[in-house]
Image (cartoon, grey):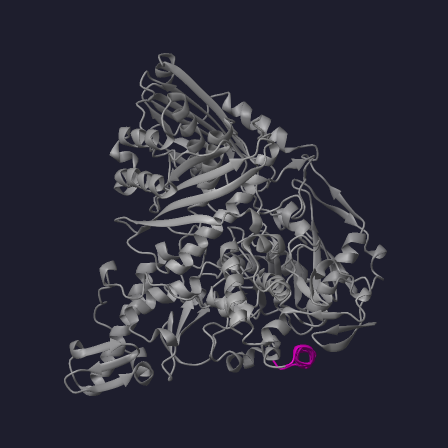
Amino acid sequence: MATDLDRREFLVTTAIVGGGMALSLHWNEANAAETFAGGRVNAKPWLPPVEGGVEIDPWIVIGSDDRVLIRINQSELGQGVMTSNPMMICEELGCDWSKVQSVLCDPNRALHDKSPYNRLRTGASSSVRLGRVAYQQAGASARERLKTAAAQEWNVPVGEVEASNGVLSHKTTGRALRFGEVAAKAAVIKLDKEPAIKTPEAYSLIGTRVRRFDVEVKARAEAVYGIDVRLPGMVYAAVKQAPYGGALKSFDFDVIKNKPGVIAAVPMEGIGTASGVAVVADSWWRAKSALDALPITWDRGANAGTSSKDFFSEFRAHLDQRGPVPVDEGDVERALAGATKIVEAEYELSHQAHAPMEPPNCTAQVSADRADLWFGTQAPDVATRVTAQLTGLSPEKVFVHNCFSGGGFGRGGLHGEFQQAVTVAKAMGGRPVKVLWSREEDISHDNGFHPMGMARITAGLGPDGMPVAIWVRIAGNDEAQGTPLIEFGKNKAKVAHQLLRGFHLFPYGTPNLRVEVNTMKTMVPPGAWRSTGSYANVFYLESFVDELAHAAGKDPIGYRQDLVRAASPTSFENNAQADWLKALDAVAEKSGWGRKLPKGTGMGVAIDDRKSVEPRGIALVALAATVSVTPSGTVTVDRLDIVHDQGHALVNPEAAERQIRGMLAWSLGPVLRQKITLRDGVVEQSNFHNYEPVRMSEFPRNLTLNFIKTDRWISGIGEEVVPLVAPAILNAIHAATGKRFRSLPLSDHDLSWA
Amino acid sequence: MFALKINGTDVDVDAEADTPLLWILRDTLGLTGTKFGCGAGLCGACTVHVDGQPMRSCTLQAGKLAGREITTIERIVADKNHPVMVAWIEEQVPQCGYCQAGQIMVATALLKKNPNPTDADVDREMTNICRCGTYTEIRNGIRKASALMSKG
């Protein structure tokens, strides 16, 4: 592949930067091994740092120099999976950790070899939860095969061979062989039975602080994200998509065809919400400039006059009538009629965008006999399948090269960019094309916004302040719009499971409980957004229970504990009832709950365990926020104290802690000022000035992160904190100002209190 | 056609003069360490140094930069012992890593001007967006780099 273009790029780069860096910008794949021989991962993560070696298992390759290459069937979004997956395998393997490397696996191979890579998705915090046992087993099996190979070599019982630090040894005779010396032999050995895997108390690598393999190539600015891929002859495309509910009517290419570098304008149709038009040119800036000058007529469709407030009106109308009732215990209406005090509140949440720092992009090359895609994606299996459909090629002829992702957050590569790249590449006659969205296109066409939703909750309190009845009514978009609803409860109520999430096992005891869930549909396509259904439901419940505590005149932490104690043990997955009480105690202690605070400063709390209607384990998290509000209404988040479930073990606490801290920053934006709204069918926000994430100065320096050990494997670490941030802060603002806010962001509200 | 001085080398660029510097770096010259984040000078992912000052290259018209010294991340990290880069590795700053070249460029300029920045200085100067929320680690990285630099 050492084409002339490659060489030209190489030389330009050399001239400019000089020295060793030039090599890292020379993207000749054949030379990649030589360039990155010392690294843990290749700057192009879909390629191994070093070619060659013996495949012991589809996940494990051992080199003659004892290097161990671990193939990763997830995507690297910054969560550290290229390090934590190898940790789980190497925990058992007995190799030398300093010689371990990793590579993102080839999604194409999953088509031929189903067992190892049967789960190519990255999401729902699932990499450890769904992978660990298989990874440990792969490591243990490979170790036993290496031991068997050595035992055969020495003609000794395999039980006398030990594997440690990449060396197989026989104590009584003092003989030793390196992994690399027996790898070829081990590769053909089959075990009679699978070895047992370690239980947590025996771990020596899992649970230790390990430097992440991908950090160095990222800190050296060598890491190749989808946007950085350059191919010989590559052209660039900028795109505009139809307004939601609309379609492309016409465009006038003649107006732009003579602009510098312009090659073509390609209509993109039949790819759902990503349909629109692409302008292709010899550089992206030229493509974008020409696109901006291209006269386009959209058929804006039936939703041209629809705005977010119309959706909220429609949702609210559903809250006024009876909806499907997945949870119905006791007689809520009768109990409410006899209550001492009624508390009712209505909450609403707008859409949110993902806005990863790397704008959506995909580079594609399509010829008569194969299709290649280069981009960072959380679902290379989907990309493979859909590309096959779009090209008419068989899936075996589709090759997805999974790049580093510049953020994922649930969107990662799922919502239109690769479909567009394939569509445009088909029109380019075998030439590779990079489709890249402007930030404006991203924020106005995320194509998978966090669903908007509403809830109205009514409770009746008894004379002791405890709830005699709670009635929850929800109306929201289903993030998986179009997939079948589930049937839940004795009424077999048809609901979207993410809209019910958390309310299906109600952690706060009340003798009469009704939950109604209205699964709404709008023309705005929703999708998975970090923390999914918990985001809305924890906001509703943890805000409301705080309102109840105040109505009852009780301390919010003590009141929650009273309610947890009043609940049935069967209302908790994993016997977590006692853990909820402990987590609330712990967050009170760590945050200094109840201490005297100056006027305008307040503390708030929230707790959740991420349980899902389709059980996938839990991770219990409690968060206390301390905020101060100036009399004129400027809010500062002063301090956050987190208590986080670590279950039996965190694989790499180093990575887990960073994700948790990062989630706090991610979640602050939608509390303070981020929201996505539509006016007349068009998204009103467009870039980071009107959809502005938090910056460093707004992120509290005063943070404590406290792990609690529990008797379970936790559900995950990648999104569990997100839903707690909004209710904890809003509850703190109430404590600080007396003002209760039931919608986000705070920039919509007047916080002044003087 | 116009001339630019990038990382100490004069280069002739064949592009429209109003092309933002970012796209000259990335698409014309293949210097992809500098990242596209917003195209409107809002996020800082595209930060380079122009005459030593951190500037957002997505809103700089390349044709107006004749005679200016442009430095990109590639030149900074070509020094394998660069204190900011070393600190970023030591403190394990990046998560997805996409914004970090821009963060390093701003941090490098900050430390040059002010080798011992206070938290308030860091808050004022480090305005680039990180969606992974690595702000704690960036702050630690700057402290570490400052310490490395004072050791010389």
Give, as a single range, the part of the protein colored magenta: A1-18
In front of the other: A665 or A676: A665
Horizontal side of residue A445 vs A68, given as left or right: right
In front of the other: A376 or A563: A563
Residue A418, given in percent of the width and then of the height, sits at 60, 58
**Dominant secondary structure, magenta:** helix
Residue A174, given in percent of the width and then of the height, sits at 19, 87
Above or below residue A646? Residue B108 is below
Residue A702, given in percent of the width and then of the height, sits at 46, 48
Instruction: Look at 27% across and 78% down and name the residue there.
Output: A146
Q: Quadrant of residue A501?
A: top left
Residue that extends furthest to the top in the rendered view of this protein: A338
Q: Quadrant of residue A558?
A: top left
Which quadrant: the N terminus of chain A? bottom right
Q: Is residue A715 visible?
A: no
Instruction: Look at 43% across and 45% down and name the residue there.
Output: A721
Disc tally is 0
Q: Quadrant of residue A325?
A: top left
User: Quick check: is A4 in the magenta stretch?
Assistant: yes
Which quadrant: the C terminus of chain A? top right
Above or below residue A602? Residue A161 is below
